[in-house]
Image (cartoon, rainbow, N blue to C red):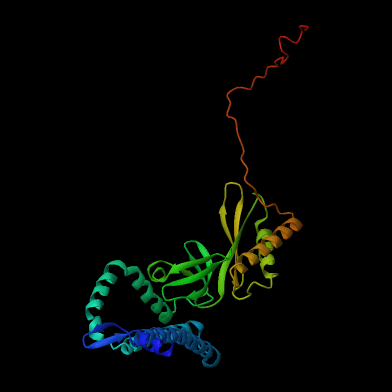
Amino acid sequence: MPENISKLLDFKVLALGNNPLTAGEIFAALLTLLIGILAAKLIFRSVGKRLLAKAHIKKNTALAITKILTYLAYVAVVLLAIRMVHIPLTTFAFLGGIIAIGVGFGAQNIISNFISGFIIMAERPINIGDLIEVDGLLGQVEEIGARCTRVRTGENIHMLVPNSSFLEKNITNWTLSDKKIRTKVVVGVIYGSPVKTVVAMLLKATRENNRIESDPEPFVLFSDFGDSALIFEVYFWISIRTIIERKTIESSVRFRIDELFREAGLVIAFPQQDVHFDMKEPLKFRLVDDKSPLSGQSG
């Protein structure tokens, strides 16, 4: 049995110039390739965790360093496997030219996204944990990959956004510099309402909320004379860390506004319409007997 295995490993599969290539060499190269890739992935994943724990660098930077080192290790493992089977690198010159032509025609988007991924990791227009708005959807960045970025929306839907989109399109990053943003709540009251009381109640509703920043202070704008209401907007600053937090704070402010308006006798307006008849003479009314002509007949 050992002799059979030895013969199998020494079996010449093909010859590259003056170098015969045996089954054993191919097996060793493939095994080296597999073990090397798995080892590189595990080692540099551990390196990334240590960078976060001990070097006190941002998660985005640690991720970029880890990915670059991992890809360099992949290249080294592939070159080692090629060396083990005695294939000269010049053999791949012609093959490399064909691959380059194929990339130029068919893989432009892949290469663009790949390069954009490293630009994002270097310039950091977005970071892991940021709240961003993509195509009208608000989501939190969970992972920045080499080709695409994974974003989780408030509905727990994961979107895979191509990295090139962050460099080519307008992406709103709500938490790029800090977690503080300004938001507003709009309310309409009926015509004839005491506007100064409305302003006081709106400010009270925001100042009582401990999740609203006191600096800068909330303020109210008399926005417009609407079709059915006097429109007011109360602006305030909040710090958000999760997707739903903004909507939760705005909702609590609306609940408190409704309570304060009821206590102060203020009425929140609703759509209504007055109809006026322009007549030259009074309307004439006529009573009509709605009984059936057959009602007096017997069956």
**Viewer-proximal residue among 122 and 181:** 122
So how many labels did they put on this image? 0
Q: Does the rendering let one see residue 51?
A: yes
Q: Which residue in the rendered view is the most extreme toward the right?
A: 298
Please name the residue shown 39% across and 79% down the image. 118
- Quarter of the image for the N terminus: give it: bottom left
Residue 120 in the image: above or below residue 2: above
Please name the residue shown 24% across and 84% down the image. 16
Q: Position of residue 23 (x, y in %)?
A: 35, 84
Residue 219 in the image: above or below residue 187: below
Q: Position of residue 185 (x, y in %)?
A: 61, 61
Q: Does the rendering let one see residue 87?
A: no
Q: In this view, does 82 lie to the left or right of 285?
A: left
Please name the residue shown 61% across and 76% down the image. 215
**Viewer-proximal residue among 88 and 158:** 88
- Quarter of the image for the C terminus: give it: top right
Q: Where is residue 100 in the image (x, y as percent from the top left)?
A: 26, 74
Q: Where is residue 99 in the image (x, y as percent from the top left)?
A: 27, 74
Residue 40 in the image: above or below residue 226: below
Q: Is residue 215 left or right of residue 7?
A: right
Q: In this view, does 133 lie to the left or right of 199?
A: left
**Viewer-proximal residue among 271 and 48:** 48
